[in-house]
Image: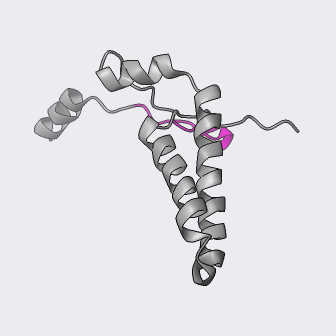
Amino acid sequence: MAYKLAPVTPLRGSFMVASIIGFLISIFLIIPNPLWMDYGIAFMIVFLVMIIASIFSMTHSQTGIELQIDKGEIKPKIIRPKKSAKRSKLKRRKPVKRKKAAKKRRKR
């Protein structure tokens, strides 16, 4: 069974800058200190994952639509779940016309 991947939204440029700066700080300032070496490696892995995520979002995103939504040129499409089969097969009652119902009450 093939799964449909969710659309990738673009991340801001500041996200990539923060991840690169954090990666460099963890390499040059935290890892050389022997007391903080374990934390430095953990930070390095986290910031590396952030860099990979920002690169992935740059290559697989549709920026045109998101920019139009941000500028307010178009409205985002709201995706609603489909109705279940059981619900659509149920008979719906016809709506009662209020004017006729009010006339019937007055006649009584």
Q: Residue furthest bottom?
A: 35
Residue 52 occupies quadrant: top right
**Front position in the image: 59 or 43:** 43
- Note whether residue 54 is visible: yes
Q: Is residue 76 above or below residue 3?
A: above
Counting from the top left corner in percent of width and height, residue 29 is at 53, 66
The residue at the far left in this view is 106
Q: Is residue 60 visible?
A: no
In the image, residue 92 above or below residue 63: below
Classified by dominant secondary structure, the portion drawn in magenta counts as: loop
Position of the N terminus by quadrant: top right
Q: Quadrant of residue 106?
A: top left
Residue 2 location in percent, x, y?
85, 36
In the rendering, at what x and y percent does residue 90 appear? 59, 39
Q: Work out whether residue 107 or residue 9 is closer to the camera in this orientation and state it.
A: 9
Q: Which residues are magenta?
A: 80-94
